[in-house]
Image (cartoon, rainbow, N blue to C red):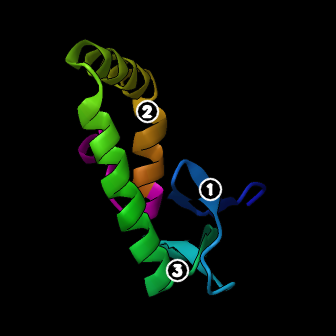
């Protein structure tokens, strides 16, 4: 495999390694010998930080006017529609779903 992904935690708008400092292989369930990438190993502290930050972000989101939230969601929907094939291929490799189900 030429290109392997690195999976980090996305917390408070930033990608970061888990506080354990450890990594685990992310493998294709249909081909267990195929390593797709490496994933950071998180701790309870990482999870607690993510929850705190998500709660704060939800409060900020709720304060945004509905039209602004709508514009943001429209942009997300546009991106998802235009990257469906790419997302489906990734789901297939990571979860063992067939492409049709992933779409």
The answer to whether one can see residue 75 in this image is yes
Which image quarter holds the N terminus?
bottom right
Which image quarter holds the C terminus?
top left
Q: Residue at x 31, y 36 (%)?
A: 61
Residue linked to disc 2: 85
User: Which is more N-terminal, label 2 or label 3?
Assistant: 3
- The spot of residue 49 in percent (x, y) is 45, 70
Residue linked to disc 3: 42
Discs 2/1, front: 1
- Residue 100 versus residue 48 in the image, above or below: above
Residue 30 quadrant: bottom left
Q: Secondary structure at mark 1?
A: strand
User: Which is more N-terminal, label 1 or label 2?
Assistant: 1
Q: Residue furthest right?
A: 2
**Gap in angstroms between the C-alphas marked 3 and 2:** 29 Å
Q: Which mark is residue 15?
A: 1
User: Which is more N-terminal, label 1 or label 3?
Assistant: 1
User: Label 3: few (<14), some or many (≥20) within 10 Å?
Assistant: some
- Residue 66 versus residue 98 in the image, above or below: above
Q: Look at the image and give the residue range highlighted in magenta.
A: 93-103
Q: Is residue 97 magenta?
A: yes
Q: Which mark is residue 101?
A: none
Q: Secondary structure at mark 2?
A: helix
**Gap in angstroms between the C-alphas marked 2 and 1:** 24 Å
The answer to whether one can see residue 33 in this image is no
Disc 2 + disc 1, Cβ < 8 Å: no
Q: Secondary structure at mark 3?
A: loop
Q: Residue at x 35, y 66 (%)?
A: 51
């Amino acid at each position: 495999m030429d290109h392997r992904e690195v999976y980090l935690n996305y917390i408070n708008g930033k990608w970061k390694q888990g506080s354990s400092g450890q990594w685990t292989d992310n493998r294709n369930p249909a081909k267990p010998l195929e390593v797709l990438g490496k994933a950071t190993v998180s701790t309870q502290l990482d999870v607690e930080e993510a929850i705190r930050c998500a709660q704060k972000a939800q409060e900020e989101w709720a304060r945004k006017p509905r039209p602004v939230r709508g514009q943001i969601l429209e942009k997300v929907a546009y991106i998802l529609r235009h990257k469906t094939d790419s997302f489906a291929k990734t789901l297939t490799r990571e979860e063992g779903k067939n492409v049709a189900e992933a779409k």
